[in-house]
Image (tube, grey):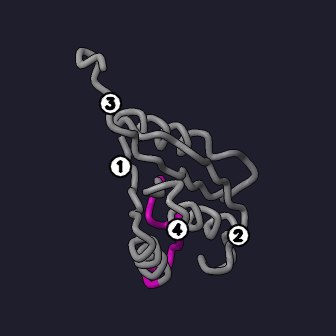
């Protein structure tokens, strides 16, 4: 065994979750999330673009897919550009955050620069 080469610890796996609020792609929000993940040496395992914002979090397939990655252990965190990306209704956002934590993960809001 070569002791001069140290194995680096596994990188945290994250899902980037974006919401499509208009006709365009949320490019700036995606880049902010990607840069944040890179700064923290996190590995992006999935990027999700949700266009079902009129529904509650528990009825949005893309958001549930992100949660499924937490439940399966494929990812440990969901990166969002703002808490309102999950839901503008605080109770819904808090409930979803609780579901993520119960599944063993966390939601990280990427600070604006």
For image coordinates 24% across by 19% down, the residue present is 3
Q: 97 left or right of 55?
A: left
| Quarter of the image that includes the C terminus | top left
| Above or below: residue 6 compared with residue 78 | above
Mark sitting on residue 71: 4
How far, Cα to Cα, is label 1 from label 2? 26 Å
How far, Cα to Cα, is label 4 from label 3? 25 Å
How far, Cα to Cα, is label 4 from label 1? 25 Å
Q: Earlier in the sequence, mark 1 or mark 2?
A: 2
x and y, in percent, of residue 54 in the image:
69, 75
Q: Earlier in the sequence, mark 1 or mark 3?
A: 3
Q: Earlier in the sequence, mark 4 or mark 2?
A: 2
How far, Cα to Cα, is label 4 from label 2? 15 Å
- Tell which of 61 and 80 is nearer to you: 61
Disc 2 target residue: 61
Q: Nearer the viewer, mark 4 or mark 1?
A: 4
Dot 1 alpha-carbon crowd within 10 angstroms: few under 14, some 14 to 19, many 20 or more: few
Q: Earlier in the sequence, mark 4 or mark 1?
A: 4
Find numbered disc 2 in the image and state the secondary structure of the residue it sits on. helix
- Which region shows up in magenta? 80-91
Mark sitting on residue 111: 1
x and y, in percent, of residue 72 in the image:
55, 64
How far, Cα to Cα, is label 1 from label 3? 27 Å
| Above or below: residue 78 compared with residue 10 | below
Quadrant hosting residue 55: bottom right
Find numbered disc 4 in the image and state the secondary structure of the residue it sits on. helix
For image coordinates 46% across by 77% down, the residue present is 99
Disc 3 target residue: 8
Q: Are marks 4 and 1 in contact (CB under 8 Å)?
A: no
For image coordinates 39% across by 50% down, the residue present is 110
How far, Cα to Cα, is label 2 from label 3? 35 Å
Mark sitting on residue 66: none
């Amino acid at each position: 065994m070569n002791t001069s080469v140290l194995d680096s610890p596994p990188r945290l796996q994250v899902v980037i979750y974006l919401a499509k609020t208009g006709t365009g792609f949320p490019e700036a929000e995606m880049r902010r999330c990607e840069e944040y993940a890179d700064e923290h040496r996190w590995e992006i395992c999935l990027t999700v673009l949700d266009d079902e914002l009129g529904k509650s979090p528990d009825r949005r397939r893309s958001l549930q897919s992100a949660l499924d990655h937490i439940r399966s252990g494929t990812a440990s965190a969901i990166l969002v550009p703002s808490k309102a990306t999950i839901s503008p209704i605080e109770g819904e956002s808090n409930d979803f955050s609780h579901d993520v934590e119960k599944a063993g993960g966390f939601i990280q809001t990427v600070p604006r620069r």
